[in-house]
Image (cartoon, grey):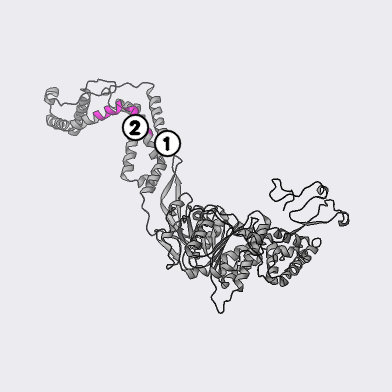
């Protein structure tokens, strides 16, 4: 009976606390509760002791009651904000799985509680207020409009949409920030290269004066390393191995070759430069090197009409036959046309016998001889080839520059050729074979032959079967060859009597020193990468998961597994800066090298030419002109055979006047 009376009194006390507040707004409650003397209100009863206790309890609970009432009033006044917050936070609860809720950290559990509170007092506020009004009628004075529900639901949906948009935008950014803050393990190996960031792993172009680092006592200066320290190659190693320089146009091949051959000239080597593209600066650099070393320098231009050298000076019949076979590509090719080349090789063998009785002869003299003139209609291929060479004054000088002088004294012979003129390209190939022959003649028993360096710029214009076979034997004769080309496709673009793969293999096997500059051909880059060997790297495997808003995030765990990549991979080769190369040798791993050009001043270049009286004594070539275009028999067409430059058509013989070489209008048939 006592506890029932106490409960009834407490209920009346709570209702009294709530009812004594005067409403000011539709969604407000009564003012804070202040307890009144219960003795005056209820009078003296038998339960007077219990009421006193209840009065004391009400006094102690009044701050809590006031706080709860203020909180409820605040919630009623900010229903729209709570509805929006519920829309923003409820997706967190919906996207969590049951096991995630159970093992959620405290901050997530607090977020879940806050989300539910906002949903109840925001989106569901009219329902909650209605329940309180039903439980305690008369103490909550409020009114609910018909538009309240649509507005609250709209704010909740807006918050939900805003939550999705924010998560789709912020999640990737937070992932990036987390990735930057993660410190990776130091035990991880190197990774595969990325073409977007590979330039940061490569050295930059360095400008300096190579002359400050050239020291014959140290060896051959080959550039600066990554630490800006000079690198040297032992002189003996340089002189006893072939070199291959690869790179696209303008990457630095000519600059590197200039530095290397400059030091070769200073070291007393004989240098032959075969340049089919007529480099702008190279002749000036090599002339300066010869002047610094006190050695002879000769400039030969095969394109000019001056008489400059005799290609077959002091040659033997066997050597001349070899020249013809190499220059005219008369070797067997494994084709049906090999049958007709038998006659061409026979003609080369017979024509070569001309030098037995005429040791100081020229190719033009052989062409003018009775044997070659007699095969004009029988062996047209050989006749046409030798006729082209006979027209070149530059290689048919009676007393020209002796190539043997460079073998004996050192210095440099710079030969300018052509990349388009077929007869000059033929002369270039024959000149290379002739240099091999001169090297083989030297005495290696009682004397140590002078080292000879032969630089073949744009290698494909010098290739022939004897020249390629000479790569393997020339080193033993004191000759080392420096080749440059732009890609492996240049090596495969060879004469018909050679196979492209065989040329590539010969260059790779015989050139132990390689300089690789930037290339643009992916096949060449892959070819270079394979030569560098492989290293162990780490491949990273990461997992990506899709969250509730269809946004991918990277998992915190990653898997590292062992893999391989090339030590110098194709991305590095394709993105090398100018004048930066990788050096391949047989003794060390490939390493980066930085070079810079040697500064020289341009001066007038003088092409080597014989004296005018010697040039005047040169025999002109006999040119046979056949104007029969309809295939008429030779008996019906006169055979016009004359010498340069008096060539005229039969119909113009009477009206034409002889013109001197200085006429402004030369003859149309002036060869």
* Main secondary-structure element of the magenta-colored stretch: helix
Q: Does 84 lie within the magenta span?
A: yes
Mark 1 surroundings: few (<14), some (14-19) or many (≥20) residues within 10 A = some
Q: Quadrant of the N terminus?
A: top left
- The quarter of the picture where residue 43 lies is top left
Q: Does 375 lie within the magenta span?
A: no
Judge left or right: residue 426 versus residue 481.
Answer: right
Judge left or right: residue 475 versus residue 160.
Answer: right
Q: Which percent across, then down, holds residue 564?
A: 49, 60
Q: Is residue 649 above or below residue 388?
A: above
User: Furthest-right residue in view?
Assistant: 636
Q: Which residue is mark 2?
A: 120
Q: Is residue 601 above or below residue 449?
A: above
Q: Which percent across, then down, holds residue 617?
A: 69, 62
Q: Which residue is mark 1?
A: 164
Q: Which percent across, then down, holds residue 19?
A: 22, 23
| Residue segment shown in magenta | 70-87
């Amino acid at each position: 009976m006592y506890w029932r009376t106490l409960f009834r009194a407490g209920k009346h006390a709570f209702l009294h606390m709530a009812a004594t507040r005067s409403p000011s707004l539709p969604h407000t409650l009564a003012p804070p509760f202040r307890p009144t003397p219960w003795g005056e209100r209820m009078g003296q009863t038998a339960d007077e002791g219990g009421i006193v206790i209840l009065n004391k309890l009400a006094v102690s609970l009044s701050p809590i009651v006031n706080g709860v009432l203020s909180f409820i009033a605040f919630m009623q006044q900010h229903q729209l904000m709570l509805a929006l917050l519920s829309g923003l936070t409820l997706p967190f609860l919906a996207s969590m799985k049951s096991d995630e809720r159970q093992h959620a950290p405290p901050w997530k559990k607090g977020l879940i509680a806050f989300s539910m509170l906002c949903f109840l007092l925001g989106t569901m506020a009219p329902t909650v207020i209605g329940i309180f009004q039903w439980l305690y009628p008369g103490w909550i004075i409020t009114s609910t409009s018909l538009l309240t529900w649509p507005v609250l639901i709209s704010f909740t949906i807006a918050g939900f949409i805003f939550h999705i948009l924010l998560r789709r935008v912020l999640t990737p950014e937070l992932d990036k920030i987390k990735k930057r803050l993660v410190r990776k393990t130091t035990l991880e190996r190197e990774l595969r290269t990325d073409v977007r960031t590979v330039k940061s792993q490569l050295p930059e172009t360095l400008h300096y004066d190579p002359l400050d680092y050239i020291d014959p006592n140290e060896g051959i200066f080959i550039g600066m390393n990554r630490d800006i320290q000079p690198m040297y190659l032992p002189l003996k190693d340089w002189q006893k191995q072939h070199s291959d320089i690869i790179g696209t146009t303008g990457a630095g091949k000519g600059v590197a070759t200039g530095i290397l051959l400059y030091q070769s000239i200073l070291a007393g080597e004989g240098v032959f430069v075969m340049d089919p593209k007529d480099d702008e600066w190279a002749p000036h650099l090599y002339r300066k090197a010869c002047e610094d070393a006190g050695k002879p320098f000769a400039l030969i231009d095969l394109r000019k009409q001056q008489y400059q050298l005799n290609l077959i000076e002091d040659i033997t019949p066997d050597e001349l036959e070899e020249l013809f076979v190499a220059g005219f590509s008369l070797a067997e090719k494994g084709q049906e046309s090999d049958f007709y080349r038998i006659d061409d090789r026979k003609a080369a063998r017979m024509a070569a016998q001309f030098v037995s009785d005429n040791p100081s002869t020229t190719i033009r003299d052989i062409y003018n001889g009775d044997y070659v003139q007699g095969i004009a209609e029988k062996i047209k291929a050989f006749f046409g080839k030798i006729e082209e060479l006979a027209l070149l004054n530059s290689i048919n000088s009676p007393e020209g520059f002796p190539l043997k002088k460079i073998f004996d004294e050192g210095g440099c012979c710079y030969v300018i050729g052509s990349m388009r003129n077929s007869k000059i390209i033929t002369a270039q190939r024959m000149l290379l074979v002739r240099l091999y022959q001169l090297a083989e003649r030297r005495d290696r028993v009682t004397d140590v032959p002078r080292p000879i360096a032969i630089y073949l710029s744009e290698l494909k214009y010098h290739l022939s079967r004897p020249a390629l076979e000479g790569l393997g034997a020339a080193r033993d004769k004191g000759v080392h060859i420096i080749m440059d080309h732009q890609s492996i496709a240049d090596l495969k673009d060879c004469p018909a009597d050679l196979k492209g793969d065989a040329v590539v293999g010969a260059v790779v096997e015989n050139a132990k020193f390689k300089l690789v500059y930037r290339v643009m051909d992916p096949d060449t880059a892959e070819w270079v990468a394979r030569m560098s060997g492989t290293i162990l790297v780490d491949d990273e495997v990461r997992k990506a998961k899709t969250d509730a808003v269809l946004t991918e995030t990277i998992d915190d765990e990653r898997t590292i597994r062992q893999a391989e990549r090339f030590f110098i991979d194709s991305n590095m080769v394709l993105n090398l800066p100018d004048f930066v190369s990788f050096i391949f040798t047989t003794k060390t791993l490939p390493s980066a090298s930085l070079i810079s050009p040697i500064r020289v001043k341009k001066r007038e270049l003088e092409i080597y030419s014989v004296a005018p009286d010697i040039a005047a004594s040169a025999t002109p070539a006999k040119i046979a002109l056949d104007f029969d275009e309809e295939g008429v028999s030779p008996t019906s067409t006169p055979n016009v055979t004359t010498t340069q430059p008096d060539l005229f058509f039969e119909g113009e013989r009477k009206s034409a006047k002889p013109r001197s070489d200085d006429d402004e209008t030369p003859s149309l048939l002036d060869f």
